[in-house]
């Protein structure tokens, strides 16, 4: 396996596009090294992108945040201002692995590894995050929900890398939250995950909402029907009932060693309600 | 237990006396500094110059015939220095031996170590290579061509017992059935144990409860994977450093498997990174030795974590039926159980132990236990801390909880009313000696835990456990140095890190010298007489008997030296407070002689001072424990949170009390893991799906609260310090205690293990449906 | 494939070594540098026995390539004591019997030290959640948490 650590985006794209064999990007390595260890992949080239400045910054520009795809979970946790702006995204980041894993893991890697259960993804979808992608044909932007398409598969073309994520400026009275269900308190892959982002008007009525579910389909879902259950309501018990029903209805899960179809569908509704309650609290405070 | 007690076994009567050192907590543990600095040497830390790295090729199929194995491409790979298959190991005839708490059959041990005609589980070793690097060894495995004929497999114990199940061994006919069956079966053996008249017992019962339970296999989950480093010398000697709970047993097994003289095999026990019974079995050692012999270089083999799960032994998965009867005022009149235990690919599960422990907390007149040992396409089971017991406790302790409630009695009061005590006749033969069961129940009842208030969806459960203490062959040597310090060479592997301090405390107590003047060292197989496995909670209990015996012999020798010096008879010299003294004023006015003084004079008076013990310790006093747990159940997800945990256990005599607390806590948390989330998950091809710590879910620090412990001391009458084994009891009650607590919290009875969130949620939903329909019926 | 040349600082010592591109930092520490204090329990980042710090950040060394340590600073268990003087955490682990078999202990100590560097007065819950990435099978975590609490008190100078 050849190891390269380019210092510019152009160099990285060149290496990725120019490789005819098996190649992967190395960000935090917390998924890729596990795959190498398990003999699931046999790489000809690994491209370490941690020396590329644009991929490692966290910047706020006029209320809108942009952070590089290779910023580690720990670095995000240590950024007080970002935590304050997007606590729901940080709920997800804080649940990736362990402290040790978060010392290396990145939201970019978490997304592009394309596990349907990735904890960083639903709250990013709920936040309306946009992925900025660079490749041989230049730069483009797509909503984060369009990056992963199936377990282990992204929509990226050969040679393309996710460079950074753009989050929109927050409307006032907004709050986001992410919850997941796991059998243990830590260390497990999510059986179900739910990210909710909502905005209230000054009468406490929800004017905007986004609901995203993880681990219940081939990729994280953006559930419009669930959002509609909250919009134009005070997010009261009746709205939460509808939210749960819509969340459960949207699930297309599988039976696997981590959960059954029945269980995931049921718990998706429960988590949606609980996440909505937290997002509501945060929106009001 | 398979072995009748020998009349020559050693018992040393309990001596009640004031103790100066035993029962305190030493400041210098002997192993601790090396462990906290990373200097302690576990098997994988050992490197021999020029060593090769060995790796094992394992079956990807649950069951298949091996049609051919072609090693040629692997052997030709540059860097590969030796390869082995079953052709390098002699076939073994049927022959049984004790290996820890389970028996082994050499015909099966060699096949489990390296498949011969067929493979019987995903992970079964098929071939092994040794190469100059790990990368080359792994690449070589990929070049081995194996032709398999895949066959139908069976995983579940009940399915395997059906007459139409695929049969793993066509030469296995159920033992214990008359007349001998004509058709081979997965049921390797049927056991029965009875007391009194079970029919009469049920006839007398006013309340009868009959329930069925199912448990999945769980793994010991030691954090250190198996590792061995072997060196076969040109002179035909094999030396191997390995992680083992019993190096002498390993030596005997290795010698047999390789058909070498035992005297030509040396096994050195490395510091052990957890065993819990799982390191009572030989896996890598013979492979490493043979690879070393053929490669003419030392060979190091370390298992990957997924190999540990796939190919070392978990516990049995079980199906257990319990039927018990009692009078309305809470007296048990009948106790019956059917135990179906799967042993994995080869016969020999913990069924005999389960049979002994199932009801042995209660004073019963009418008992009937029937059990089946069943082979299935899973790895051969190994012992795991009280092997067989948690599964039957799951059944019995929850049925008892039901009976107590039916009688309107507190669960502890119900148990007190039926408690086993000194003189209770067990159903498997012996009467119990003095035991501390009642004391643990009473202390639990009095514990502050019982006063804690429970909130909504919170509940409290109680359960109890029993385990015996093995004795067996134990050897030790005490050497007294010229400077008056003592060295104990012990051979019962110190699996926890605490036994060696316990031994040192006892030697210091016996000699009457400070604890700091005693050093302990682990002896390899060339240094001592035979020592049985550290298993059956015998490590400190039996090891300390040998330490006492050896020390007393050293003391006798020191008294002899004083007698020779003073020119008196040896029986006119006594040992007191670390000195040889004249037995009385009439013997003479001789100044007492300290250990150091005697050591300086020893050579002149006949030779240096040492004491040996090579004894077979009688099976020791059993241990009992009572556990109380509070849980909270999330009704909407089925998640169970452990809020509070208390356990009380009889240690006989706590030599090292704080260490014992740690063992109690560790065993309880293993039990909590077993109860809530641990299980082996197989797919429909019989391949293990969760062969790693991500999806084999052992408790993490945030999953459990502090575990409150209380030690009760009812001395073991056959041990000079009253010690009982303590290591295994703690893992038995958590599973039923949590099941009982879940019932107390939300009213559902869990009988299917593990009690993971989906199962609890489903039980809650089924309960809601059942309640709704019964209400509907009542309303009509 | 030729080996990679790596220069890294390990416990303050400038160290040069050769390694394969697929070797992890854990492999390098144990097999190339002979530093066996850092343990392999799983190789997949699930048990924490291989914990080290990399440029001061707590990581699993099995999830870092040896090459990635180039130019960086690694701290392992072997560097935790200062000569004869044990770190307060090491001493408290001994005093409180926070270890039995000891195989998880190096990883736990490294992780606990990182915790106390970031939070000198952690609650019981904060300790448990921080250490969730370090599996222990012998102790049930009880005495480990007590030892960390005791070390925190001592290190705060209370």
Image: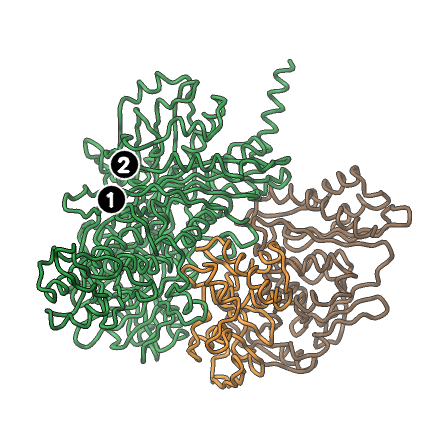
Picture colour for chain B: green
Q: At x 47% / y 81%, what residue is drawn?
A: C19
As helix, strand or loop, the secondary structure at mark 2 comes to loop
Callout 2: chain: B
Q: At x 49% / y 27%, what residue is drawn?
A: B410
Residue contact between numbered discs 2 and 1, judged by CB atoms under 8 Å: yes
Write down the quadrant of residue B84 in the picture.
Answer: bottom left
Q: Nearer the viewer, residue B114 or A74?
A: A74
Residue A268: percent from left, percent from top? 67, 45
Q: Which chain: brown?
A: A
* Disc marking residue B433: 2
Per the image, the residue denoted by label 1 is: B718
Q: Which chain: orange?
A: C
Q: Nearer the viewer, residue B725 or C10?
A: B725
| Residue B494 appears in the rendering | yes
Residue B403: percent from left, percent from top? 45, 25
Crowd band around label 2 with a 10 angstrom C-alpha radius: few (<14), some (14–19), many (20+): some
Callout 1: chain: B
B266 up-or-down from A269: above or below: below
- Per the model, the C-alpha gap separating discs 2 and 1 is 10 Å
């Amino acid at each position: 396996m050849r190891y390269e650590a380019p210092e510019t985006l152009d160099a990285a794209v060149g290496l990725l596009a120019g490789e005819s064999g098996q190649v992967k990007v190395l960000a935090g390595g917390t998924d890729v090294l596990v795959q190498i260890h398990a003999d699931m992949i046999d790489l000809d080239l690994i491209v370490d992108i941690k020396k590329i400045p644009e991929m490692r910054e966290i910047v706020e520009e006029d209320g809108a945040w942009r952070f590089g795809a290779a910023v580690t979970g720990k670095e995000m946790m240590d950024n007080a201002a970002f935590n304050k702006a997007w606590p729901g995204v940080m709920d997800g980041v804080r649940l990736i692995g362990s402290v040790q894993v978060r010392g290396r893991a990145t939201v970019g890697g978490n997304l592009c590894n394309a596990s349907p259960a990735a904890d960083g993804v639903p709250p990013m979808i709920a936040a309306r995050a946009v992925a900025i992608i660079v490749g041989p044909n230049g730069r483009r932007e797509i909503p984060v929900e369009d990056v992963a398409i199936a377990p282990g598969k992204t929509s990226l073309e050969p040679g393309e890398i996710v460079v950074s994520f753009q989050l929109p400026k927050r409307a006032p009275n907004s709050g986001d939250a992410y919850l997941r269900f796991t059998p243990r308190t830590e260390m497990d892959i999510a059986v179900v995950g739910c990210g909710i982002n909502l905005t209230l008007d000054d009468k406490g009525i929800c004017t905007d909402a986004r609901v995203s579910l993880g681990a219940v389909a081939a990729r994280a879902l953006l559930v419009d029907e669930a959002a509609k259950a909250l919009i134009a309501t005070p997010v009261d018990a009746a709205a939460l009932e509808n939210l749960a029903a819509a969340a459960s209805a949207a699930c297309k899960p599988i039976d696997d060693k981590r959960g059954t179809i029945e269980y995931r569908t049921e718990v998706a509704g429960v988590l949606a309600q609980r996440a909505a309650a937290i997002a509501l609290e945060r929106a009001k405070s | 237990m398979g072995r009748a007690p020998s009349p020559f076994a050693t018992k040393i009567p309990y001596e009640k006396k004031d103790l100066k050192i035993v029962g305190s907590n030493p400041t210098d543990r002997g192993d601790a500094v090396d462990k906290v600095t990373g200097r302690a040497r576990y098997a994988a830390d050992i490197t021999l110059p020029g060593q090769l790295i060995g790796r094992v090729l394992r079956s990807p199929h649950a069951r298949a015939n091996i049609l051919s194995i072609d090693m040629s491409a692997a052997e030709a790979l540059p860097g590969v220095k030796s390869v082995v298959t079953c052709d390098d190991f002699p076939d073994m005839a049927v022959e049984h031996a004790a290996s820890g708490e389970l028996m082994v059959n050499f015909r099966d041990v060699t096949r489990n170590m390296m498949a011969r005609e067929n493979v019987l589980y995903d992970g079964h070793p098929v071939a092994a290579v040794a190469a100059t690097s790990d990368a080359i060894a792994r690449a070589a495995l990929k070049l081995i061509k194996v032709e398999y004929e895949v066959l139908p497999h069976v995983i579940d114990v009940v399915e395997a017992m059906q007459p139409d199940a695929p049969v793993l061994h066509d030469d296995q006919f159920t033992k214990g059935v008359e007349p001998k069956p004509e058709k081979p079966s997965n049921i390797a053996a049927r056991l029965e144990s009875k007391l009194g008249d079970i029919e009469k017992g049920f006839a007398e019962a006013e309340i009868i409860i009959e329930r069925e339970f199912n448990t999945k296999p769980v793994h010991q989950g030691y954090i250190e994977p198996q590792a061995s480093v072997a060196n076969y010398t040109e002179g035909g000697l094999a030396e191997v450093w390995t992680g083992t709970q019993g190096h002498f047993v390993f030596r005997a097994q290795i010698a047999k498997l390789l058909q070498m003289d035992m005297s030509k095999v040396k096994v050195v026990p490395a510091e052990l990174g957890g065993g819990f019974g799982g390191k009572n079995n030989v896996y890598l050692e013979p492979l490493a030795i043979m690879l070393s012999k053929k490669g003419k270089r030392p060979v190091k083999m370390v298992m990957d974590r997924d190999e540990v799960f796939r190919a070392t032994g978990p516990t049995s998965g079980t199906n257990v039926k319990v039927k018990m009867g009692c009078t309305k005022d809470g007296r048990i009149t009948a106790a019956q159980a059917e135990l179906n235990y799967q042993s994995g690919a080869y016969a020999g599960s913990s069924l005999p132990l389960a049979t002994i422990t199932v009801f042995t907390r209660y004073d019963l007149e009418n008992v009937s236990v029937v059990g089946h040992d069943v082979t299935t396409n899973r790895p051969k089971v190994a012992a795991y801390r009280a092997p067989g017991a948690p599964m039957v406790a799951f059944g019995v302790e929850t049925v008892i909880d039901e009976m107590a409630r039916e009688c309107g009695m507190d669960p502890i009061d119900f148990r007190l009313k039926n408690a086993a005590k000194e003189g209770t006749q067990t159903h498997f033969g012996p009467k119990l000696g003095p035991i501390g069961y009642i004391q643990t129940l009473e202390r639990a009842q009095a514990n502050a835990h019982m006063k804690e208030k429970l909130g909504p969806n919170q509940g409290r459960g109680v359960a109890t456990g029993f385990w015996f203490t093995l004795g067996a062959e134990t050897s030790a040597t005490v050497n007294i140095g010229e400077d008056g310090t003592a060295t104990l060479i012990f051979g019962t592997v110190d699996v926890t890190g605490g036994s060696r301090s316990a031994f040192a405390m006892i030697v210091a107590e016996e000699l009457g010298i400070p604890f700091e003047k005693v050093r302990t060292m682990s002896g390899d197989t060339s240094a001592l007489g035979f020592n049985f496995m550290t298993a059956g909670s015998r490590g400190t209990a039996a090891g300390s008997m040998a330490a006492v015996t050896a020390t007393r012999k050293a003391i006798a020798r020191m008294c002899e030296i004083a007698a020779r010096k003073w020119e008196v008879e040896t029986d006119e010299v006594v040992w007191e407070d670390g000195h040889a003294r004249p037995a009385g004023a009439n013997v003479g006015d001789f100044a007492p002689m300290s250990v150091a003084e005697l050591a300086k004079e020893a050579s002149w008076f006949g030779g240096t001072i040492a004491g040996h013990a090579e004894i077979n310790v009688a099976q020791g006093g059993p241990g009992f424990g009572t556990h109380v747990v509070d849980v909270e159940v999330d009704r909407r997800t089925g998640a169970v949170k452990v809020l509070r945990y208390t356990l009380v256990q009889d240690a006989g005599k706590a030599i090292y009390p704080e260490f014992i607390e740690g063992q109690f806590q560790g065993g309880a948390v293993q039990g909590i893991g077993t109860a809530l989330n641990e299980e082996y998950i197989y797919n429909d091809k019989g391949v293990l799906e969760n062969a790693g710590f991500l999806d084999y879910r052992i408790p993490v620090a945030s999953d459990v609260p502090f575990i409150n412990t209380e030690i009760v001391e009812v001395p073991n009458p056959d041990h000079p310090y009253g010690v009982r084994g303590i290591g295994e009891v703690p893992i038995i009650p958590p599973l039923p205690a949590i099941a009982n607590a879940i019932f107390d919290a939300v009213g559902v009875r869990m009988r299917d293990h593990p009690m993971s969130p989906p199962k609890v949620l489903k039980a809650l939903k089924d309960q809601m449906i059942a309640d709704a329909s019964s209400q509907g019926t009542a309303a009509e | 494939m030729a080996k990679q040349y790596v220069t890294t600082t390990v416990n303050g010592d400038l160290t040069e070594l050769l390694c394969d591109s697929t070797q992890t930092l854990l492999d390098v520490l144990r097999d190339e540098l002979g530093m066996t204090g850092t343990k392999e329990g799983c190789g997949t980042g699930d048990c924490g026995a291989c914990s080290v710090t990399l440029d001061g950040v707590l990581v699993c060394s099995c999830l870092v390539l040896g090459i990635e340590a180039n130019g960086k600073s690694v701290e392992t268990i072997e560097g935790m004591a200062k000569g004869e003087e044990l770190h307060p955490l090491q001493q408290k682990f001994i005093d409180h019997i926070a270890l039995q078999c000891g195989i998880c202990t190096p990883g736990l100590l490294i992780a606990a030290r990182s915790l106390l560097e970031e939070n000198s007065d952690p609650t019981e819950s904060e300790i448990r959640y921080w250490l969730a990435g370090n599996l222990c099978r012998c102790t049930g975590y009880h005495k480990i948490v007590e030892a960390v609490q005791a070390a925190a008190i001592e290190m705060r100078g209370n």
